[in-house]
């Protein structure tokens, strides 16, 4: 009985391996490229316009993302005045969003990046087909591809 049960456990464990192998894995360089593309694409304005940091993030979004990523509160001013922490938070969120979109749109990195750029601007993964949002998505996608094609520094 133990051998039979052990065999079932092993076969169940092995049967889940291909599913795990198929799960898209977002690399640090993909996250980094997305974060930098969003930073470079952000319209420049001051905190007095209601957006903070190089990424131009709304105060209510900063609070939600800081709780999710840092497990603590962060004020918009702290986010604005600490670029390393802002980048850490945006990277955390981009990792989550890219992972979702790589799963939703397998084998099409450009489409996944475009969906995340649309989400960044509108809160939706789709609907950025015309006007300012379409231009933003194109800009982010182009900058993302440029970041990804840069040679990686050698350790």
Image (cartoon, rainbow, N blue to C red):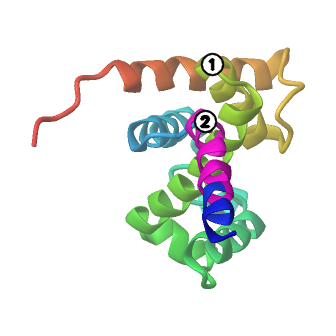
Query: Do the residues under discs 2 and 1 have CB atoms within 8 angstroms?
Result: no
Q: Residues within 10 Å of mark 1 (few under 14, many from 20)?
A: few
Name the residue tied to disc 1: 107
Secondary element at tag 1: loop
Q: Is residue 21 magenta?
A: yes
Which sits in the foreground, 48 or 133?
133
User: Horizontally, is 32 left or right of 66 in the view?
Assistant: left
Q: Residue at x 62, y 56 (%)?
A: 7
Q: Is residue 99 magenta?
A: no
Q: Which residues are magenta?
A: 8-23
- Farthest residue toward the front? 1
- Farthest residue toward the right? 127
Q: Position of residue 79 (x, y in %)?
A: 53, 70
Foreground mark, 2 or 1, reads 2
Q: Position of residue 74 (x, y in %)?
A: 60, 80
Question: Residue 147's image quarter?
Answer: top left
Q: In the rendered view, tell whether residue 127 sits above or below residue 71.
A: above
Q: Residue at x 66, y 42 (%)?
A: 15
Name the residue tied to disc 2: 18
Secondary element at tag 2: helix
Q: In the rendered view, tell whether residue 91 sits above or below residue 81.
A: above
User: Horizontally, is 125 left or right of 49 in the view?
Assistant: right
Q: Residue at x 60, y 81 (%)?
A: 71
Mainly helix, strand or loop, the magenta region? helix
Question: Residue 92's image quarter?
Answer: bottom right
| Label 2 – label 1 distance at C-alpha | 16 Å
Q: Position of residue 31 (x, y in %)?
A: 48, 42
């Amino acid at each position: 009985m133990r051998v039979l049960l052990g065999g079932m456990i092993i076969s169940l464990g092995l049967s889940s391996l291909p599913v795990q192998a198929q799960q898209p894995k977002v690399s640090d360089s993909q996250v980094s490229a997305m974060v930098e593309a969003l930073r470079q694409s952000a319209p420049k304005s001051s905190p007095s316009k209601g957006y903070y940091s190089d990424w131009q993030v709304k105060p209510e979004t900063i609070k939600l993302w800081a709780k999710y990523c840092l497990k603590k509160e962060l004020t918009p001013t702290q986010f604005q005045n600490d670029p390393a922490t802002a980048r850490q938070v945006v990277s955390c969120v981009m990792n989550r969003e890219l992972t979702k979109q790589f799963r939703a749109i397998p084998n099409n990195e450009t489409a996944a990046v475009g969906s995340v750029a649309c989400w960044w601007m509108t809160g939706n993964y789709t609907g950025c087909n015309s006007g300012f949002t379409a231009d933003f998505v194109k800009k982010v996608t182009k900058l993302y591809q440029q970041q990804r094609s840069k040679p990686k520094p050698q350790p």
